[in-house]
Amino acid sequence: MHEAFTEFAILLLISAAAGAIALRLRQPVLIAYIVVGIVAGPAVLGLVSAQGEVDLLAQVGVAVLLFLVGLKLDIKEIKHLGPVALATGLGQLAFTIVFGFVLTRVLGRPPLEALYIAIALTFSSTIIIVKLLSDKRELESLHGRIAVGFLIVQDLAVVLAMMVMSATGGNADQGLTQIFLSLGWRIAVAAVGMFVLMRWVLPPLVAAMARSQELLLVFAVAWGTGLAALGEWAGFSREAGAFLAGFSLASTAYRDGIGARLSGLRDFLLLFFFLDLGAKLDLSALSGEVMPSIVLAVFVLIGNPLIVMAIMGFMGYRSRTGFLAGLTVAQISEFSIIFIAMGVSFGHVGSDTLGLVTLVGLITIALSTYLILFSHPLYDRLAPWLQRFQRKVPHRELAGTDGMSITSGAPEVVVLGLGRYGIRLLRGLERAGFSVLGADFDPDRTRSLRRDGLSVRYGDVTERAFLDELPLAGAHWVVSALPDVASTRSLVEALREHGFRGSIAIVAREPGDDIELQSLDVDLILEPVSDAVDRTIDTLSHAMQRTRQPA
């Protein structure tokens, strides 16, 4: 026990250091954890000897991950999945499975193994994508909402694939009809059980547990692991059982509190899954998987975004929206590795397949992270070639211009980028008596603001052609409230090329952005965080002066 504790301490210290390096390189920490597992495993340093303990924590981590996935899938949200999210999600799944299977067969893999790999290539990492979009403040953008929608479709597909795989795990001699009949009646029983629990049992039980936050956390973990064990006993899988446990609590009023408390535990326990994975990889076997992994990684990095762009273009979205949404599926996820690991445990595929998919994951996650971080300048460079993925009339986005209200005459101020800050700025300037026009790339947002009586236009403010359509000649000020430095820089350059002679104000969102933006030819740099803090200090100072007792 003493040796196991020391080993755990060393692994955690190495993982923390490797994670810090990964963050410095703007990479997800899971890549660092897999590398640490490889280095600490028997292939290199041989530090991982407490394999049973690490493996148990890894299994609990996977169960908690699936529990949280189910917890986020509220029935109401599933009902309101948009047609574009559903069509794009299902289309991408079908494309990747079919072409991935063909490509893997060409690489010499047997049919069952090729099917496993093709399915694994379809899943994208919800955790990584949501984190990247959130950091870029694009989670509420049009492409961000679409991406989250088809990631939900992928999450549902993950669980269904795991259920089917579990049903076939120990029944290799049965026919497909028997397998699916067996799976069907078990799903029916599980559905009835979930309905009864969610309708009459869980609401009062969770309410009683929620009287203590500590007890609520213990209950959530117990419920997730308990149903995971029950799912395995019932012939599904631990993962499917954990997902159903989370889904059964998704409609309760306490799901956000449970999710917030379990997120840190999930990240900690998944550390051991990736350490365990890295430690089990046979480096000698991986040497023969380098070229196949590169071929499959290129397929994921290019093929998945292209099919998303094609589907969204056909449905009436601009190439820019399709490109930004498509980049979110240019990697495989932790679920892909978990899926293949389950296949190894059932004897359907070998450990070399797990190594191959892990290599594909390392390559695609690392590269797609940078693709998403620099998506806007990347689109600007590729735009001439990407126009073929857009209809001549992108009707679904142009619907955002219907019924548009425009200020009479030229506006005094034009606000470009209507996120939270831009909307407050637009409303505030209008209340102050200025003639204001807003513009944004999100058709849903522009429609909502027009219903509120605000003067807005729909369009991509970084495109020079759209700037030509705006009444900038008589405007005194243009205020850029765009979310990132690259877009702001592109906008300022476009305004100068357009010949705008008024004043330009730009918003520095993050600490340090103001230094990078000072090189631009602008009249004013707004710093929301610093301005808010200064105002708070003034307000507090006046309040404290009033309450200060005389000496």
Image (cartoon, rainbow, N blue to C red):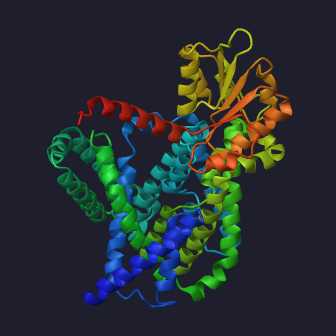
> Is residue 186 visible in this depiction of the protein?
yes
Image coordinates of residue 514 in percent, x first then y, are 63, 46
> Is residue 116 visible in this depiction of the protein?
no
Foreground of the two, 89 or 68: 68
Foreground of the two, 32 or 85: 32
Above or below: residue 395 compared with residue 509: above
Q: Residue at the top extreme?
A: 408
Q: In this rendering, would 344 be left or right of 307?
A: left
Residue in the picture at 71% in, 25% down: 477
Residue in the picture at 27% in, 62% down: 225
Q: Quadrant of the N terminus?
A: bottom left
Place residue 169 in its image quadrant: bottom left
Q: Quadrant of the C terminus?
A: top left
Above or below: residue 474 compared with residue 92: above
Image coordinates of residue 111 in percent, x first then y, are 60, 70
Above or below: residue 230 compared with residue 398: below
